[in-house]
C-alpha cells in the first residue's frame, strides 16, 4: 500500500539514494582494503566514484598511465578501483604472473566479466571459455597444432602466399614508387595465411588498390568495438547500448553477423563436398579435419573465428612494429640481412629458419617493446594472496601487463626503452650467438602455463619467413618522421597505419 501511495518520481529518487548509499559503503570497504595493501600504489581514489576522474583523463593513454604507476610501485603492482567495474589488480611482477598463469591457475580463469566482453564476437571459442569447454577445445587444438605435418603445411602455405602474392605486390609497389600502408598489407597477408590453414581458402586480395574483403572489414569492426568495451570508463554504458541496439553496439551486432554468416557458409559448403574429393586435392586444413571428426557446426564456427583472429592480428601487429623498429635502426637491419645471407642457402625450410637467431632476437625485442597483446585479464574465484603480498578478493580482476613489463627497469635494466636485440644473447658481444633463456613469466607474450599459446612456433615460423623474404629483397622506409602511436585494441595496432616506401635492396656485388 505504501509503495502504491508514492509518486513514481519519489520512488525512483528513493531507489537512487539507496543505490548511492550502498555504493558508498562498498567504496569505503574498498578503501579499507586498499589501506591493507598500502605498499601497492595506484591512481587517486575517492568514495563512490573510485578513480573514475583520473581514469577518464587518461583513457586515451592507459598503457603509459599504467606503466608510470607500476614503475613507481615497490612491487610493480597497483590497485585500481573504478566505478562500475570489478576491483582490478594490475601487475608487472613476474612472480605474480607465474602464480596467476601457472601456480594457482585454477583460481584465475578468464571469468564471466571477461567472456561477456568478447562473447558476442568469439562466442564459445577457445580464447573465450573456461572449464571443461576450454579443456575439450584445448585438447583438440593441441592435437591439430602440433606435429610435423602441420609444420610442413604451414611452410608450403607460406611459400605460396609469399612467393606468388606478397612479393609480386611489393615488387610492383617498388617499381611504381607508390606509398603503401604496410600494416594493412601485412594484415591482409596474415588473414590469407590463417584462412588457408584453417579454412583452406584465400580471403583477401593483397593489391592495395582493391578494397579489403567484407570478411576482413567485419573482423576489424568487431575487434575494435569489442576491445573498446573493455576500456570504457563505465561498463554500464555499452551494456545499455547493446540492450537498446544503438550506436557502436548496433554496428558490432552487424559485423559479428557478417563474420558468422561467411564462416558458417564455408563450413556448410565444405560439408556438402565429398570428403574423398577434398583429400584427393591434398587439402589438410583445420576445417576439413574438424568436419571429419563430427564436431557441431557452432563449435567449429567459434573455434575457427578465434583462430582466425589470433592468427591474423597478432602476427601482423608484431611484424608491423618489427619493420618500423628496423627502419629506425639501419645498423640492426644490416645485421639481419647479413645473417640471412650467411646462414641460409637454397630453399627456405624449417631447419634453415631455426638458424636465424639474430632475426628471432629482433622479433623478441620488438614484441618486448610492442607486444601484440599488451594486457590480459583473469578473474579470481576465491580470496587469494599474490606472492608480493597483494590481497586478492573473490571476483577481483587480475591483469598481467606485458606492455608495462617490457618497460620495467627492474626486469630489463636502464636501457629498457632501447631497441637492443643483443640483450637476448648470453653474452651481448659474443660471436657464438647463444640465445639466453628468458622466463615466459618475465616475457609473457605468448602467455604461459596451461594456457600457453599453441600457435607460438607457427607464429615464429611465419614471422621469420616473411621478414627473411622481404628483407633480402627490399628496404622499408617509413614516410613520417613522427613516433607512431601504439593503440591497444584486442591486439596492438599502429594508429593511422604504417605508410612506407618499398625500395629495392642492392646486392653486395652492386655496392
Image: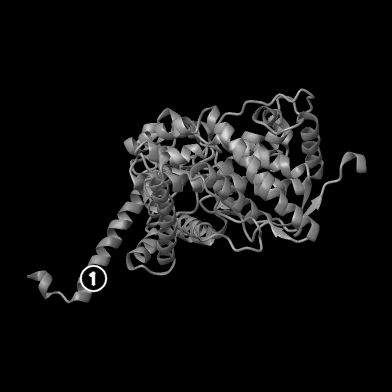
Determine if residue 174 is in view. yes
- Residue designated by label 1: 12
Count of numbered tags: 1
Position of residue 267 in the picture relative to residue 280 (left or right) = left
Q: Residues within 10 Å of mark 1 (few under 14, many from 20)?
A: few
By what rule are the colours in the image chosen? one colour
Residue 352 picture quarter: top right
Position of residue 65 in the picture relative to residue 414 (left or right) = left
* Residue 241, x across and y down, in percent: 37, 66
Residue 151 sits above or below residue 400 on the image: above
Residue 80 sits above or below residue 361 on the image: below
Residue at 41%, 57% (x, y): give it: 261
* Residue 408, x across and y down, in percent: 62, 39
The residue closer to the viewer here, 379 or 163, is 163
- The residue furthest left is 1
* Helix, strand or loop under label 1: helix
Give the quarter of the figure containing the C terminus. top right
Residue 132 picture quarter: top left
Determine if residue 69 is in view. no
Give the quarter of the figure containing the N terminus. bottom left
The residue closer to the viewer here, 487 or 45, is 487
* Residue 154, x across and y down, in percent: 58, 37
The residue closer to the viewer here, 354 or 489, is 354
Residue 344 sits above or below residue 64 on the image: above
* Residue 405, x across and y down, in percent: 58, 40
Position of residue 62 in the picture relative to residue 1 (left or right) = right
Residue at 75%, 60% (x, y): give it: 480
Residue 46 picture quarter: bottom left
The residue closer to the viewer here, 446 or 14, is 446
Residue at 72%, 47% (x, y): give it: 325
Amino acid at each position: 500500500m505504501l509503495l502504491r501511495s508514492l509518486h513514481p518520481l519519489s520512488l525512483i529518487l528513493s531507489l537512487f539514494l539507496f543505490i548511492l548509499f550502498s555504493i558508498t559503503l562498498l567504496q569505503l570497504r574498498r578503501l579499507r582494503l586498499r589501506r591493507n595493501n598500502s605498499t601497492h600504489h595506484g591512481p587517486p581514489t575517492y568514495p563512490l566514484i573510485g578513480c573514475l576522474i583520473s581514469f577518464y583523463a587518461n583513457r586515451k593513454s592507459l598503457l603509459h598511465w599504467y606503466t608510470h604507476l607500476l614503475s613507481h610501485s615497490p612491487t610493480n603492482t597497483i590497485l585500481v578501483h573504478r566505478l562500475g567495474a570489478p576491483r582490478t589488480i594490475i601487475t608487472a611482477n613476474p612472480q605474480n604472473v607465474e602464480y596467476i598463469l601457472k601456480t594457482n591457475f585454477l583460481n584465475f580463469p578468464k571469468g564471466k566479466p571477461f567472456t561477456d566482453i568478447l562473447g558476442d564476437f568469439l562466442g564459445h571459442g577457445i580464447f573465450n571459455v573456461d572449464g571443461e569447454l576450454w579443456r575439450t577445445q584445448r585438447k583438440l587444438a593441441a592435437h591439430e597444432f602440433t606435429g610435423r605435418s602441420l609444420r610442413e603445411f604451414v611452410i608450403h602455405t607460406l611459400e605460396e602466399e609469399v612467393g606468388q602474392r606478397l612479393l609480386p605486390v611489393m615488387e610492383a609497389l617498388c617499381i611504381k614508387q607508390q606509398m603503401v600502408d604496410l600494416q594493412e598489407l601485412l594484415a591482409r597477408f596474415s588473414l590469407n595465411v590463417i584462412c588457408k590453414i584453417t579454412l583452406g581458402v584465400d580471403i583477401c586480395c593483397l593489391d592495395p588498390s582493391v578494397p579489403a574483403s567484407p570478411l576482413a572489414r567485419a573482423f576489424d569492426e568487431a575487434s575494435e568495438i569489442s576491445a573498446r568495451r573493455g576500456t570504457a570508463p563505465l561498463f554500464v554504458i555499452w551494456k545499455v547500448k547493446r540492450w537498446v541496439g544503438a550506436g557502436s553496439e548496433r554496428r558490432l551486432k552487424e559485423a559479428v553477423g557478417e563474420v558468422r554468416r561467411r564462416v558458417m557458409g564455408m563450413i556448410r559448403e565444405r560439408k556438402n563436398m565429398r570428403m574423398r574429393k577434398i583429400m584427393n586435392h591434398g587439402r589438410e586444413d583445420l576445417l576439413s579435419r574438424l568436419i571429419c571428426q563430427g564436431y557441431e557446426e557452432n563449435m567449429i564456427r567459434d573455434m575457427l573465428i578465434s583462430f582466425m583472429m589470433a592468427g591474423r592480428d597478432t602476427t601482423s601487429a608484431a611484424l608491423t612494429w618489427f619493420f618500423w623498429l628496423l627502419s629506425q635502426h639501419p645498423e640492426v637491419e644490416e645485421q639481419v640481412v647479413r645473417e640471412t645471407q650467411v646462414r641460409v642457402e637454397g630453399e627456405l625450410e624449417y631447419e634453415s629458419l631455426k638458424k636465424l637467431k639474430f632475426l628471432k632476437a629482433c622479433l623478441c625485442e620488438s614484441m618486448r617493446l610492442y607486444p601484440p597483446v599488451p594486457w590480459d585479464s583473469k578473474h579470481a574465484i576465491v580470496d587469494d594472496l599474490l606472492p608480493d603480498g597483494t590481497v586478492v578478493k573473490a571476483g577481483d580482476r587480475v591483469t598481467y601487463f606485458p606492455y608495462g613489463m617490457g618497460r620495467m627497469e627492474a626486469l630489463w635494466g636502464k636501457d629498457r626503452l632501447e631497441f637492443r636485440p643483443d640483450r637476448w644473447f648470453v653474452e651481448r658481444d659474443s660471436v657464438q650467438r647463444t640465445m639466453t633463456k628468458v622466463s615466459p613469466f618475465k616475457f609473457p607474450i605468448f602467455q604461459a602455463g596451461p594456457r600457453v599459446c599453441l600457435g607460438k612456433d607457427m607464429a615464429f615460423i611465419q614471422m621469420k619467413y616473411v621478414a627473411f623474404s622481404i628483407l633480402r629483397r627490399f628496404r622499408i622506409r617509413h614516410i613520417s618522421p613522427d613516433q607512431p602511436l601504439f593503440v591497444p585494441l584486442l591486439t596492438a595496432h599502429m594508429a593511422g597505419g604504417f605508410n612506407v616506401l618499398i625500395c629495392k635492396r642492392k646486392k653486395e656485388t652492386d655496392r
